[in-house]
Image (tube, rainbow, N blue to C red):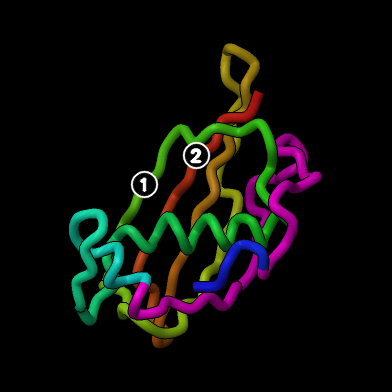
Amino acid sequence: MSSPADGPPRLSSVRYQDLAVGRRFGPFAERLDQAASDALRGEVGVSRAGTEAPLGVLPLLTLRVLRRALGGIVPGGVLLGLHVTTVEGLPAAGAVDVDVHVSDQRRRPDGGLSTTFTFALAAEGRVRAIVDWTILAP
């Protein structure tokens, strides 16, 4: 995976309230590398070889894609929830295509706005995982 300096700005000018449910972004081409997969498999500081990517790559990939989709990370939000559904394992190294869309938005009684982004991660033409991020913005 490339470094954050290789992509869009760190912060976005997009506001959560300007995003509409159903809005789609992508597909984005990402790449998993063996070293990142191995480093995330097992305890911190121990690299373990394997052919399937560990679940720890999913937050990394989806954060990179969200940053690309929104032209940076929208400031002020806090992650309320992360839900992962695996259909089939991702290979430890190789191309991953990621589609993302705004799947839900709700105004909370406290005035905050929760926005859910759904990511579909595919490899070798098959969806391998679905990841939902719910972010609360003031």
Image side of residue 108 versus residue 93, left or right: right
Task: Please state the total of marks drawn on the protein image.
Answer: 2
Pick whichever, 41 or 28, lies toward us.
41
Res 115 quadrant in image: top right
Question: Where are the magenta residues, as a range?
Answer: 6-35
Q: Is residue 100 left or right of residue 42?
A: right
Q: Are marks 2 and 1 in contact (CB under 8 Å)?
A: yes
Q: Which residue lies under the disc numbered 2?
A: 134
Label 2 to label 1: alpha-carbon separation: 9 Å
Looking at the rendered structure, the kind of residue marked 1 is: His
Dividing the image into 4 quarters, which one contains the C terminus? top right
Position above or below: 52 against 43: below
Amino acid type assigned to the residue bearing label 2 in the image: Thr
Local packing at callout 1 (Cα closer than 10 Å; few below 14, some 14-19, many 20+) is: few
Marks 2 and 1, the one that precedes in the sequence:
1
In this rendering, the answer to whether 117 lies above or below 49 is above
**Residue ID at (56%, 30%):** 136
Which residue does the image show at 60% across and 56% down from the upper left?
66
For the residue labelled by badge 1, is the local secondary structure a helix, a strand or a loop? Answer: strand
Is residue 17 inside the magenta stretch? Answer: yes
In the current view of this chain or complex, which residue is farthest to the front? 45
Decide: few, some or many residues near mark 2? Use Cα within 10 Å; few <14, some 14-19, many ≥20: many
Q: Position of residue 44 (x, y in %)?
A: 25, 54
Does the stretch in magenta take in 52?
A: no
Determine the residue positioned at 50% across, 59% down. Answer: 62
Which numbered disc covers residue 13? none
The residue tagged 1 is: 83
Between 32 and 24, the residue placed more toward the observer is 32
Instruction: Pinpoint residue 96: horizontal percent, then vertical percent.
Output: 46, 77
Specify the quadrant of the image occupied by residue 78.
top right
Q: What is the x, y in percent for residue 75?
A: 69, 37
